Image: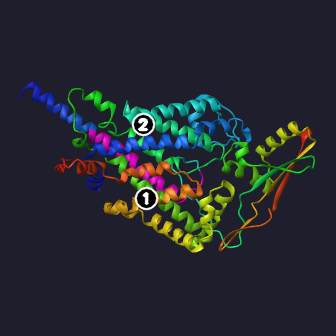
């Protein structure tokens, strides 16, 4: 056997070794990702494990007679008539709008985003107090489709401009 | 067991299939970023009150070099400026274009995946959580560890200067696993979706009113005219819901029996297109990644009227 044959043989062995190591590394990676997706996909609802997450979109069943929950905010200065303030006007996503403004107000929880809206309204209207009211869409689901009714007041948060 | 595992994941596969998926995936990710107007979204999140900034652990770790600060949950979490996140988005755009063209392919795909992950996590830190991003992030990072730029790439043009190689003839032991990984992820995504519906609502979920409710809400809140129109047809909507459950719970069949992809892939594309048109959920990343189910090299050979090559030795 000459030197070149030995070198070629060694190179082939080295290449096979590297390929085997790569296979093991990829196998560990694939098995980990799939196992994590199975475990998290069927158990954990949060996002802390992102990008491996569960997919619970649209999981909630709804029934005839339920009202839609797309809420709309009305901002009123010093008891005057409220002005509608939707997510498009605020240039934020509908999800952020609902989760960070309307839902906390309905639940009576503090909403930093609502406080920021109130602060801006205080300055622009030169008001003493700002009321942010949340109304539902007024739609109820029936077999033949949604039926429109009056909007229902779901909750109100009042802000004292001097305290903001 | 080990032999079966290796045979499944590491049978030499056409690099052409992987390359086509790379191009489509990068394009889909770029389209998603453009469609969702991510620069505007990022700028809009900048002035948000710090109290609602609640980043996930991965985002906290990624931001550790930026410094320290308290998040809404009281745990340390630096908050990057919107300008910084916008620049990361620009890095993503450049890397995705490079990945699509196949220039410094592996590095470009890795950077694109990481930057996409960073931008997604920034949005989610403000509770703006969606499910369209994870599949693409995992796919980009997986392809970064594969011979995704072996053919149909500027890299291959540069590498084979003066000695052109038929892209359909190149096979690799590592060309199949990213595609198979994404196929199985789709199976588990859909099963997770069915599982959530069944454990949360049971079979009541497919009562027709559920989807009528979601459609009417999309129509009323976001002005989706088609959704509002469709919400008036109870029986049709209920049949659609049953179809969704059947599709999601049996999707695994098209991975086990590949011939069924010719049913599941068109149905899946139709499903996601309908969801986009009616409910406004933009799953373009998933639609792009459906490319993993298509045998692109076989299709190209048939279109080119070639004979099928003998399978290469493992």
Quadrant assignment, res A121: top right
On what subunit does the disc labeled 1 rest?
Answer: B
Residue at x 27%, y 56% (from the top left corner): B4
Residue beneath label 2, please? B109
Residue B187, labelled with which disc? 1
Residue B31 is situated, as x and y percent measured from the top left of the image, at 50, 42
Which sits in the foreground, B231 or B91?
Answer: B231
Residue B10 is situated, as x and y percent measured from the top left of the image, at 28, 48
Residue at x 29%, y 42% (from the top left corner): B15
Q: Earlier in the sequence, mark 2 or mark 1?
A: 2
Which quadrant is home to the N terminus of chain B?
bottom left
Judge whether residue A164 can be spotted in this image: no
B280 in relation to A67, above or below: above
- Give the structural element (helix, strand or loop) at label 2: helix
Residue A70, labelled with which disc? none
Mark 2–mark 1 distance (CA, rounded to whole Å): 24 Å
The residues colored magenta run A19-46
């Amino acid at each position: 056997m000459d030197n070149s044959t030995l070198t070629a043989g060694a190179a082939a062995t080295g290449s096979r070794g590297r390929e085997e190591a790569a296979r093991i590394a990829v196998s560990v990676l694939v098995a980990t990702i799939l196992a994590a997706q199975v475990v998290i996909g069927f158990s954990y609802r949060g996002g802390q494990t992102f990008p491996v997450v569960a997919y619970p979109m649209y999981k909630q069943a709804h029934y005839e007679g339920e009202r839609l929950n797309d809420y709309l905010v009305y901002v009123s200065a010093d008891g005057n008539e409220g002005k509608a303030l939707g997510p498009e006007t605020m240039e934020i996503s509908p999800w952020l709008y609902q989760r960070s403004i309307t839902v906390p107000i309905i639940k009576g929880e503090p909403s930093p985003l609502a406080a920021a809206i109130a602060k801006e309204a205080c300055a622009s209207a030169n008001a003493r107090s700002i009321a942010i009211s949340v109304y539902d869409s007024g739609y109820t689901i029936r077999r033949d489709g949604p039926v429109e009714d009056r909007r229902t007041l779901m909750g109100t948060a009042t802000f004292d401009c001097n305290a903001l | 067991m080990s032999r079966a595992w290796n045979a499944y994941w590491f049978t030499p596969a056409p690099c052409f299939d992987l390359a086509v998926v790379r191009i489509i995936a990068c394009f889909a990710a770029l389209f998603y970023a453009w469609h969702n107007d991510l620069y505007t979204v990022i700028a809009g999140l900048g002035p948000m009150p710090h109290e609602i900034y609640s980043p996930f652990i991965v985002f906290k770790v990624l931001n550790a070099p930026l410094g320290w600060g308290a998040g809404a949950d009281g745990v340390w979490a630096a908050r990057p400026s919107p300008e910084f996140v916008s620049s990361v988005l620009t890095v993503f755009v450049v890397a995705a274009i490079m990945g699509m063209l196949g220039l410094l392919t592996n590095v470009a795909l890795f950077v694109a995946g990481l930057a996409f992950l960073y931008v997604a996590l920034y949005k989610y830190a403000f509770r703006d959580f969606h499910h369209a991003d994870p599949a693409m992030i995992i796919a980009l990072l997986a392809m970064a560890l594969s011979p995704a730029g072996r053919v149909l790439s500027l890299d291959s043009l540069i590498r084979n200067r003066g000695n052109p190689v038929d892209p359909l003839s190149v096979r690799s032991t590592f060309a199949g696993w990213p595609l198979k990984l994404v196929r199985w992820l789709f199976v588990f995504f859909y099963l997770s979706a069915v599982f959530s519906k069944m454990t949360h609502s049971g079979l009541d979920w497919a009562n027709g009113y559920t989807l009528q409710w979601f459609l009417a809400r999309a129509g009323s809140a976001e002005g989706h005219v088609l959704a509002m129109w469709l919400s008036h047809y109870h029986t049709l909507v209920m049949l659609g819901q049953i179809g969704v459950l059947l599709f999601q719970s049996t999707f695994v069949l098209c991975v086990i029996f590949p011939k069924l992809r010719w049913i599941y892939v068109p149905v899946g594309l139709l499903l996601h297109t309908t969801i986009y048109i009616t409910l406004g959920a933009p799953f373009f990343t998933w639609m792009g990644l459906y490319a993993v189910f298509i045998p692109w090299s076989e299709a190209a050979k048939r279109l080119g009227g070639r004979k099928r090559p003998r399978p290469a030795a493992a």
